[in-house]
Image (cartoon, rainbow, N blue to C red):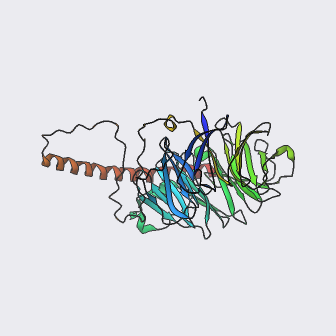
Amino acid sequence: MNNKELLLTSSQLSQQFSACLWDYNTKNVLKLYKNGGSIPPKTLDVIEQSYILSAEIAKPLLHVWPLNSQEIDKSIKLILPGPATCLSICPKNTYLAVAIDTKLYIWQINSGKLVTVQQRHYQPITCVKFSSDSEYVVVSGEDGILVVYLLADLIAIYHSLLSQSSIGQVEPKYIKNDHSMPITHIDLGVFGRNSRIATCSVDRTSCLYSLSTGELLLKLVFHTPLTTILIDMPCWRLYVGSNSGHIRYYNLKNPPRTLTQYVQKGEDYDFIGHKDKIVALALNLQNNILASGSLDNFVYTWDVFSKQILHKFEHKSAVTNVKFVANYSNFFEQNFKVGIIVKPLERNIDQDSDDFIISAIQNEDIQLSDDESSTEKELLRKQCEEENTNLRIINTQLYRAAISISKKYNNINNKD
């Protein structure tokens, strides 16, 4: 198999499988991931090259499958405070963000520690995304509010010498209120802090923001309620799914002169084929194949340039997730070593924030000497604790210095 990418899908009916892995060029089924229940939209992701992670509809659980196994790993039990509405794994595979009703929870994956719980929305959260450099966390809700946090602020053990469990709510980088109805989906570019945020809403509008500043760059007004949005890798094209089943294409290389643009109906700019609401969109790495999932039980792959359907993947019920994933060798290895540890998730923020332990994979054998005395081991332990404390102090100082430099740099740019 020469494919660099594969297609991962899920649907509302889970009798045959919870998630399915396809070769999207031949339509062959490569893997069926079973016994994880029905996976709700925006709750299917891959952890590094080791696991597939998903939530289950109406249950406070996350399920984990090793990439090469069709059965969930029963040794990893991830219990949530409530049913997840959406989730996201940061690109560095270190943090997991889960939205439960109106609250945002963030856990460290390899220790299971709950590092923060935030509640800025007064209606359920609809989407959460990490920026490509893991610097920002972007959250949208049914209240039409877009909230952008700095991840460093959310996960910091101390804020002005107060522990995370004591300070409560973290001040966001900024909040946007440009939608009058629920935001249904958000997407981010791949250029880190220089990326764009694209949003879509039931109010028939789509907004484009600068990620670092929150400046509104463009507002598009469509003729139908919008359900999902996707921005391509160079940030040149915008794909918007709608209630009607049409997927609209908008060219960002030729922006209008006004801040608000009314997008007229026109088949020249539509991907036409689905018969019901679009629930998921995905692009491959080459940005030449678009995948779409709909309530009509089909996943389509499209040629981006001709807007023609390449293949149809039929499911037994409404599609909930569509995702291109790298063709990892671990998908087909009989025995492979996982690259990351996944620990059970804590339910509360630990009051003793000093006791912060990180699990790691040890690939090489550790040679221990039998003649080491208990006194020497205790001395070594104390030295490690002191060094750990010093490193935390240094990291805190570096973080504060970086924030100060960043603020000065922004002030200089604003004056210019």
Answer with left or right where residue 137 lies relative to residue 263. Answer: left
Q: Position of residue 313 (x, y in %)?
A: 70, 44
Residue lying at 43% horizontally and 64% vertically, measured from the top left: 347
User: Foreground: 238 or 54?
Assistant: 54
Q: Is residue 284 above or below residue 383?
A: above
Query: Quarter-wise, where is residue 311 in the image?
Result: top right
Residue at the spot 20% in from the left edge and 39% down from the top edge: 368
Answer left or right for 139 relative to 255. left
Q: Name the spot of residue 96 as percent of width and height, x first.
A: 49, 54
Residue lying at 86% horizontally and 46% vertically, measured from the top left: 267
Q: Residue at x 13, y 49 (%)?
A: 375
**Residue 306, image x, y percentages:** 80, 36
* Residue 416 appears in the picture as rendered: no
Give the quarter of the figure containing the N terminus.
top right
Relative horizontal placement of residue 345, taking residue 268 as reference (left or right): left
Q: Is residue 177 left or right of residue 43?
A: right
Q: How many marks?
A: 0
State the image quarter where residue 175 is shown: bottom right
User: Is the residue 117 above or below the residue 265 in the image?
Assistant: below
Rendered location of residue 171, percent (x, y): 53, 63
**Is there any visible trace of residue 137 in the rendered image?**
yes
Residue 172 drawn above or below residue 25 = below
- As drawn, the residue found furthest toward the top would be 2
The residue lying toward the viewer, choosing from 29 and 409, is 29
Residue furthest out toward the front: 15
